[in-house]
Image (cartoon, grey):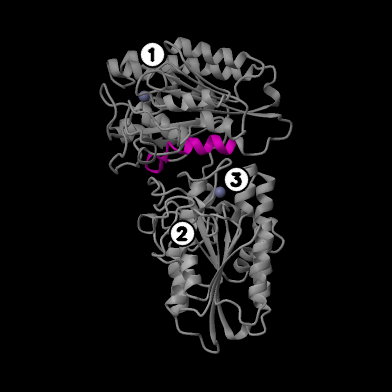
């Protein structure tokens, strides 16, 4: 039997090996757990990851040969499982990082692939950023304390270990994060059990057992090898000891536990690191349903494209340019356009427009409007991002029509030269419009010393160009400025507004539809948007004007932040009154 047949024999997983998810989704699953409201009757969120280092996927065909095990127990008791993959890219694409220990766990702990984390193989120390879940959850106040329990010294206990800098950072900042390296798996078992038996155990425990990797290197990563099969039994036993310890906690009834079992890579012959299916196909087993953002976004049935065909957010520039260059429709005398920017609004929030009484996106979609998926970060998922999924680069891509490599807007507060020009300047200078206006409240756009369009704004002012760059103190001010403009008889031909509600409330409370304050931010943004739409439609000259209306965010978010490569952060959208493709 070849390996694909062995994979197809695994009946306990909910996807296929061909649709395996990137192991980076582990990060999102943990984040999602901690940023979802507590179920009725529960008082605290907890999670444990039980890692079986180097445990090949085909071992899931051997659960009958196991008396007692964590995977066996979870699957038999309503748990769920999916195929995942190591190596950074789905089969049969070439791998972009070794199917090895450090890259595997680091991808799960940070959501980042090697091109973004620097961890291509074992023996490299990661910078503090991108931060792992161990410190991120504590630092962002999602949990009180975490522990990282291992026995391999390559994680944080020897020169070249992956998390050395992160461990130092945690100590320096006095974060409540334990980095425990035992001398072997027995020691790791004891460390985890000690933690789980304490009243106030760690809220997040990340444990890695070496049994299977150790014996795989010795005898081959095959269930037919008694040594490897025994190692799998030991891993399952110890994993089950952890699950039992969780369930016997006196306070278990009021704790909401996420339990995940996974592996960093498989193995082929007596090694791993390469691109074979044996090495790269892994799995995630959970006590809860496994719903990734991919699954969630597929529910947006009204989109005109798919996640796979999402367009770069630079397309906003092209859509606007095309609108102003196209001939006026019959009976119209003037082209107009407005962009309603919702900073940091996650795309899955479009599934919650029912909670909005009256909103711009809601109204456009209800009246024959169109919507497409776009993406931040410069590259499509699951490729590594080309720049951070942040405010500066996001709006920068839309305003200049260029990705960071050409625009140089890699970060927030990057200072762009006058060239390449944003549409605010270019459309007036090139005669596409008579006037433009850019209404914001964030200082990083053009008011601070280090801000993206400051030089462009100064240039426009010195040349007397009819482009207005106006910053208000907050979103109310932005709305007021934009409203005054659209209510004036000779309003700007092209208006770009950015509202900060979702970004501000996301950073403060968490970017997740389950978070009430973040839900409020959708309502607030939509309300500001429809106030402007209604004012536009009430213009005395509205019937002679050909308006293009776009609603779009610059990036999403996960946990209390963004800038990383997760789907939650990088998938964006455009909703419009006109056809977009
Ligand atoms: Zn490993
Ligand atoms: Zn932000």
Local SS, label 3: loop
Q: Residues within 10 Å of mark 1 (few under 14, many from 20)?
A: some
Q: Are marks 1 and 3 in contact (CB under 8 Å)?
A: no
Q: CA distance from mark 1 to mark 3?
A: 43 Å
Is 323 or 54 nearer to us in this picture?
Answer: 323
Q: Is 382 placed left or right of 575 in the picture?
A: left
Rendering coords of residue 328 (x, y %): 49, 85
Mark 1, residue position: 230
| Residue situated furthest front in the rendering | 462
Q: Quadrant of residue 182?
A: top left
Magenta stretch, main secondary structure, is: helix
Mark 3, residue position: 511
Stretch in magenta: 16-33
Is 357 or 58 nearer to us in this picture?
Answer: 357
Residue at 49% over, 54% down: 392
| Residue situated furthest left in the rendering | 269
Q: In the drawing, what numbered circle is on residue 396?
A: 2
Whether residue 22 appears in magenta in the rendering, the answer is yes
């Amino acid at each position: 039997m070849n390996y694909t047949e062995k994979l197809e024999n695994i009946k306990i997983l909910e996807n296929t090996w061909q649709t395996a998810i990137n192991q980076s989704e582990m990060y999102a699953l943990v984040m999602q757990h901690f940023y979802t409201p507590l179920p009725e009757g529960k008082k605290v969120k907890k999670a444990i990851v039980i890692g079986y280092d180097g445990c090949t996927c085909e071992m899931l065909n051997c659960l009958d040969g196991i008396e007692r095990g964590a995977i066996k127990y979870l699957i038999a008791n309503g748990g769920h499982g999916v195929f995942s993959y190591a190596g950074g890219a789905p089969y049969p694409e070439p791998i972009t990082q070794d199917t090895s220990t450090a890259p595997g766990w680091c991808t799960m702990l940070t959501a980042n692939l090697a091109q973004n984390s620097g961890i291509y193989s074992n023996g490299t120390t990661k910078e503090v950023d991108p931060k792992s879940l161990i410190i991120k959850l504590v630092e962002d106040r999602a949990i009180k304390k975490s522990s990282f329990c291992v026995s391999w010294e390559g994680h944080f206990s020897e020169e070249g270990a992956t998390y050395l800098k992160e461990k130092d950072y945690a100590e320096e900042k006095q974060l409540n994060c334990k980095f425990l390296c035992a001398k072997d798996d027995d020691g790791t078992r004891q460390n985890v059990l000690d933690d789980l038996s304490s009243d106030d155990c760690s809220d997040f425990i990340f444990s890695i057992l070496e049994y299977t990797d150790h014996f795989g290197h010795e005898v081959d990563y095959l269930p037919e090898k008694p040594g490897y099969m025994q190692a799998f039994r030991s891993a399952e036993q110890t994993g089950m000891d952890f699950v039992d310890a969780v369930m016997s906690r006196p306070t278990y009834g009021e704790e909401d536990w996420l339990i995940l079992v996974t592996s960093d890579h498989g193995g082929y012959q007596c090694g791993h690191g390469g691109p074979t299916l044996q090495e790269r196909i892994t799995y995630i087993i959970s006590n809860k349903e496994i719903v990734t953002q991919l699954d969630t976004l597929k529910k947006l049935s009204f989109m005109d494209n798919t996640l796979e065909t999402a367009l770069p957010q630079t397309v906003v520039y092209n859509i606007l340019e095309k609108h102003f260059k196209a001939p006026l429709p019959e009976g119209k005398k003037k082209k107009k356009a407005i962009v309603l920017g919702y900073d940091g609004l996650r795309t899955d929030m479009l599934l919650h427009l029912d909670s909005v009484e009256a909103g711009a996106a809601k109204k456009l979609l209800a009246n024959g409007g169109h919507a497409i998926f776009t993406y931040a970060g410069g590259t499509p998922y699951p490729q590594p991002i080309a720049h951070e999924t942040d405010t500066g680069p996001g709006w920068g891509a839309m305003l200049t029509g260029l990705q960071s490599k050409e625009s140089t807007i890699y970060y927030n507060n990057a200072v762009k030269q006058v060239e390449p020009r944003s549409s605010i300047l270019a459309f007036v200078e090139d005669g596409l419009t008579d006037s433009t206006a850019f209404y914001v409240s964030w200082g990083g756009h053009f008011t601070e010393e280090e801000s993206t369009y400051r030089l462009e704004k100064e240039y426009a002012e010195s040349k007397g160009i009819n482009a207005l760059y106006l910053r208000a103190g907050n979103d109310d001010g932005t709305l007021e400025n934009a409203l005054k403009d659209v209510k004036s008889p000779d309003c700007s031909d092209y208006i770009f507004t950015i509202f900060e509600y979702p970004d501000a409330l996301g950073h403060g409370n968490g970017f997740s539809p389950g978070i009430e304050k973040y839900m409020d931010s959708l309502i607030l943004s939509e309300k500001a948007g429809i106030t402007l739409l209604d004012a536009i439609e009430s213009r005395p000259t509205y019937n002679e004007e050909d308006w293009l209306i776009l609603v779009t965010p610059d990036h999403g978010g996960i946990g209390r932040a963004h800038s990383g490569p997760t789907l939650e952060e990088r998938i964006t959208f455009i909703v419009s009154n006109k056809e977009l493709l």
